[in-house]
Amino acid sequence: MEVDQALFTAMRFNFLYVDRYVFRSGWVFPESYVPYSMVRYILKGAASFSINGVEYIVGEDQVIYIPDGVELECHSLGDYFEFISIRFKPTVQLDAGDFLSDYYKIKTVNTALGDEKILDYFMEVYLNATSDNPGKLFRIRGNLELIIAWLTEQAADRAVASSDRPEAGFSMENLFHRASRSSQFKQDPRVNALVEYIVSHPTEHFTSESLSQMANMSPSSMRRLFKKYTGKSPSDFIQDLRLMVAARRLLVTNKRISVIAYEAGFEDPNYFSRLFRMNFGVSPQEYRKNAQ
């Protein structure tokens, strides 16, 4: 259990983003690389989630965990689909794989029916993120960790019920095995630092030269390594983050769409609208209207 304690004390989870989504019939999220972890609480409806090619059907009062660095595709299975999605990033990247699923055996799909506290945790994160409460960041982080604790407890309950040993994943033999098996996924710390900075400053003006200077490498090396470890070019990665920023502002402000586009880093509102439709399946106007 010493390995367990060492991992526990070293790991923290940085909150990135939360939103409440409503999609109608025909919603599709095309297969994309996900550069952060997500937990989603399904409020109504059902959908198919494909994670690295494995399909999961999720429905009302279920929580789905999507680890960092997977290929994700999803689509609705009915006329109405609503969920709360929280995005976060572990402060420590483990060579051996995903911390929560590998070491705490957290499952992809978890049933929350009859357990109202987990929905309360999700709602607290969402409501505080959209409030002016000066202590909201602490409440968001606290409730995010409560969600992760709940997921960990669900995994432990299943392990006990199946006579599995929860501590089996912490043996040195298993750790060495995972490390050797996943050596090809080791990340460059310069790319990690660059990704964390971009995620924290999505609307800042970036150029290939400025990014390469920040990472202390040549522009060609920066672009090559960035795509190798994130699955996307720097420009595509930044564009996706800015679309997330814009989507959130469409829901929580009454600003004109052109103003939101400029604030999110898009100089041409028409180009922004085309990109938004490609990524969310609806126009910015329809996205705002559906959410309301």
Image (cartoon, helix red, strand yellow):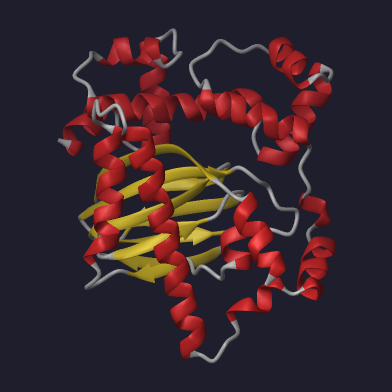
Q: Residue at x 25, y 62 (%)?
A: 117
Q: Residue at x 26, y 58 (%)?
A: 119
User: In which quadrant will I find the N terminus?
Assistant: bottom right
Query: Residue 56, image x and y in percent?
Result: 44, 67
> To which quarter of the image does residue 221 belong?
top right
Query: Residue 45, image x and y in percent?
Result: 23, 60
In this rendering, position of residue 195 left or right of residue 277: right
> To which quarter of the image does residue 126 belong?
top left
Q: Residue furthest bottom?
A: 163
In this rendering, position of residue 264 left or right of residue 67: left
Query: Residue 69, image x and y in percent?
Result: 61, 49
- Residue 28 visible in the current orientation: no
User: In which quadrant will I find the C terminus?
Assistant: top left
Q: Residue at x 52, y 25 (%)?
A: 200
Nearer-the-camera pick, 220 or 86 = 86
Q: Residue at x 76, y 30 (%)?
A: 190
Nearer-the-camera pick, 189 or 6 = 6
Up the image or down, 151 lies above or below 75; here it is below
Up the image or down, 275 lies above or below 3; here it is above
Up the image or down, 176 lies above or below 262; here it is below
